[in-house]
């Protein structure tokens, strides 16, 4: 009976997983606080060697890791952090040494994680290259836009393109948007077909607005929606000062039914303006003819 109990106790003792002391990897934290050491190839190699001595060359530690999934996962996370720091500093020989002499003996596969880190680093490099390229070859474009109004607001839909029927730039960065007493300003940078583009739209509005009650938000498929609060609740006869019309500006026809009462009033104002302009032109021609008549009589 005693022999069976002792045997059962020994089996339980050796089959019970215990937590391994991984403090031997704590030295890595000091390197993270002073990451310049990862930039030196000799230092990077020394770091990997210290990891190898602790995890692999100590047989008891290596076997304990292989026997305990929890400790092995904790070690994997610590080693992944080390790989990330080495990748950021182009220490690829040290990474190769770490894979061959530490990860492989522990049967740890970090390839998927390393690919994600590499893609992120590549993305950051591409962004830097794009910024550098944009500074020298940026094309400045006035984006096209549609507009509609209610009695209380003016609504703009800006498309990041130079034509309404052209594909828009799907993503812009470093956007700057300002509402002024009688103006609206938009600026942003994008890349389309590898061409850096600076979108700039500067509008002097027909009447005053309330900047603090105006708003904007980015929409999908490369568009910006803008809501401009009018200072006076009335229908505007034009969007821009002096009835200016920009090449890429048009009415937002899809929204016309929603604001049909306001649009009918707007169309009447436009007709009145056109009639007034026509009368002014006629008066101008008549005045010019009268001024020219005395000169012709003398001849």
Image (spheres, grey):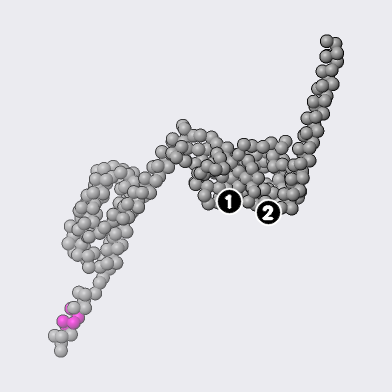
Residue 250 visible in the shown view:
yes
| Structural distance between the alpha carbons of marks 1 and 2 | 23 Å
Side of 29 where 270 appears, left or right = right
Name the residue nearer the viewer: 40 or 275. Answer: 275
Is 72 above or below relative to 243? below
Q: Is residue 162 magenta?
A: no
Residue 43 visible in the shown view:
no
Is 68 above or below relative to 270? below
- Secondary element at image label 1: strand
Judged from this view, the residue extending furthest toward the bottom is 1
User: In the rendered image, which quarter is residue 298 located in?
Assistant: top right
Q: Residue 52, percent across and down?
A: 21, 54
Q: Residue at position x 27%, y 45% from top?
A: 92
- Secondary element at image label 2: helix
Magenta span of residues: 6-10
Q: Residues within 10 Å of mark 1 (few under 14, many from 20)?
A: few
Q: Which one is earlier in the sequence, the residue at label 1 or at label 2?
A: 1
Side of 298 where 125 appears, left or right = left
Q: Residue 161, percent across and down?
A: 54, 41
Q: Residue at position x 28%, y 42% from top?
A: 40
- How many badges with numbers are in the image? 2
Q: Residue beneath label 1, please?
A: 217
Q: Residues within 10 Å of mark 2 (few under 14, many from 20)?
A: few
Q: Residue at position x 23%, y 64% from top?
A: 65
Q: Residue 203, percent across and down?
A: 65, 39
Magenta span: predominant SS is helix
Q: Residue beneath label 2, please?
A: 257
């Amino acid at each position: 009976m005693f022999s069976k109990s002792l045997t059962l106790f020994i089996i339980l003792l050796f089959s019970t997983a215990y937590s391994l002391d991984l403090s031997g990897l704590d030295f890595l934290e000091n390197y993270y606080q002073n990451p310049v050491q990862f930039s030196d190839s000799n230092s990077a190699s020394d770091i990997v060697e210290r990891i190898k001595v602790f995890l692999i060359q100590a047989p008891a530690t290596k076997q304990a890791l292989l026997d305990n999934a929890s400790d092995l996962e904790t070690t994997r996370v610590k080693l992944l952090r080390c790989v990330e720091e080495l990748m950021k500093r182009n220490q690829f020989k040290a990474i190769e040494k770490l894979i061959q002499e530490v990860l492989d003996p522990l049967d740890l596969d970090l390839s998927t994680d390393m690919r994600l880190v590499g893609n992120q680093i590549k993305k950051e490099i591409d962004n830097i290259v794009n910024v550098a390229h944009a500074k020298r070859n940026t094309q400045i474009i006035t984006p096209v836009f549609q507009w509609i109004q209610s009695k209380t607001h003016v609504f703009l839909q800006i498309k990041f393109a130079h034509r309404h029927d052209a594909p828009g730039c799907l993503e812009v960065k470093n956007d700057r948007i300002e509402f002024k007493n009688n103006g609206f300003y938009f600026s942003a940078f994008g890349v389309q077909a590898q061409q850096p583009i600076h979108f700039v739209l500067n509008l002097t509005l027909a009447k005053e607005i309330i900047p603090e009650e105006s708003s904007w938000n980015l929409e999908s498929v490369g568009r910006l929606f803008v809501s401009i609060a009018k200072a006076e609740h009335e229908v505007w006869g034009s969007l821009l000062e002096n009835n200016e019309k920009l090449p890429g500006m048009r009415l937002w026809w899809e929204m016309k039914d929603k604001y049909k009462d306001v649009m009918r009033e707007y169309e009447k104002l436009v007709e009145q303006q056109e009639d007034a302009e026509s009368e002014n032109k006629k008066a101008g021609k008549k005045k010019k003819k009268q001024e020219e008549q005395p000169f012709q009589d003398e001849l």
